[in-house]
Amino acid sequence: MLKRTVTALSARRFILCRHGETNFNAVGRIQGTLDTSFLNLNGVTQAGGLGKYLTLATKNDEIDIKKIYVSPMTRARQTLSICKSILESHDIKLPSEIILKELREIELSSWQGKLKDDLIKEHPSEWETWKSDPENFSIEGFNPLKELWSRVDTSWSTILTNNKAGDTLIVCHGALGKCMIQKAVGVRDFRDVKYGLRNCEAIEIIPEEKKWRRLYPESGEWIYGEKLIK
């Protein structure tokens, strides 16, 4: 469980969460901005666990959610809905969520809806570029990561401008979430797996101090760039 340190109290704090597992996640199918996937049974269970964690942290005065931002995509909104229902069943009042279109997942064009295993077989060189040099990867002349970074810039600008104090909950996606963390702490390396998010994982971010750490389901040390903060 996180502790409200003097540092955390003196700066704006953001709790960023990835959505629960979907039917696409379970079989290795690319989702991107395709909004036809939905939480499977495991994903619903994961969202319930996240909701219970947020409930306990709120009851212990360790989290005080003042604003909520969510991706417009079904899987993210389902996850938030489950979390909210649990918090509200414990008489915890939450603000209405703000749907921020820029928080949608990375756009992977014609790859969306296809199995990763099939893409590896059918487009081996393109897949290798995506994994080894994602910044320069393109699909039919479109650069997915360049567009994603642009939306991340817009998302943080909007969220920071409209949040002057208190804790903010953000529910979004894996690739988008990774870039949100990196933007907040001044890093830009999509290949760095350290910034990866598991389904329904919760991350704490303090942008003013350029640091972040894992909260749920496992807690971790503060990280700034490549260094741990003791």
Image (spheres, grey):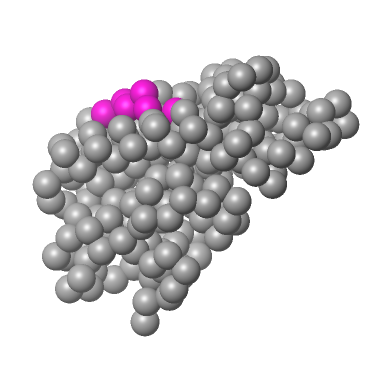
Q: Position of residue 20 (x, y in %)?
A: 54, 40
Q: Residue at x 16, y 39 (%)?
A: 161
Q: Nearer the viewer, residue 135 or 152?
A: 135
Q: Is residue 23 above or below residue 170?
A: above
Q: Residue at x 47, y 28 (%)?
A: 147
Q: Is residue 47 above or below residue 81?
A: below
Seen as rendered, the residue at the extreme right is 121
Position of the N terminus, as image quadrant, is bottom left
Left or right position of 216 against 107:
left
Q: Nearer the viewer, residue 138 or 222?
A: 138
Left or right position of 69 against 199:
left
Q: Position of residue 89 (x, y in %)?
A: 31, 42
Position of the C terminus, as image quadrant, is bottom left
Left or right position of 166 against 210:
left
Q: Residue at x 63, y 33 (%)?
A: 137
Q: Quadrant of residue 72?
A: top left
Q: Quadrant of residue 185?
A: bottom left
Q: Position of residue 125 (x, y in %)?
A: 80, 34
Q: Is residue 101 magenta?
A: yes
Task: Report if residue 27 is visible in the image.
Answer: no
Q: Nearer the viewer, residue 101 or 78?
A: 101
Q: Nearer the viewer, residue 210 or 83?
A: 210
Q: Residue at x 50, y 60 (%)?
A: 217
Q: Is residue 4 above or below residue 176?
A: below
Looking at the image, how many numbered discs can be counted on the residues? Answer: 0
Task: Report if residue 192 is visible in the image.
Answer: yes
**Range of magenta residues:** 98-104
Q: Is residue 31 magenta?
A: no
Q: Position of residue 58 (x, y in %)?
A: 26, 56
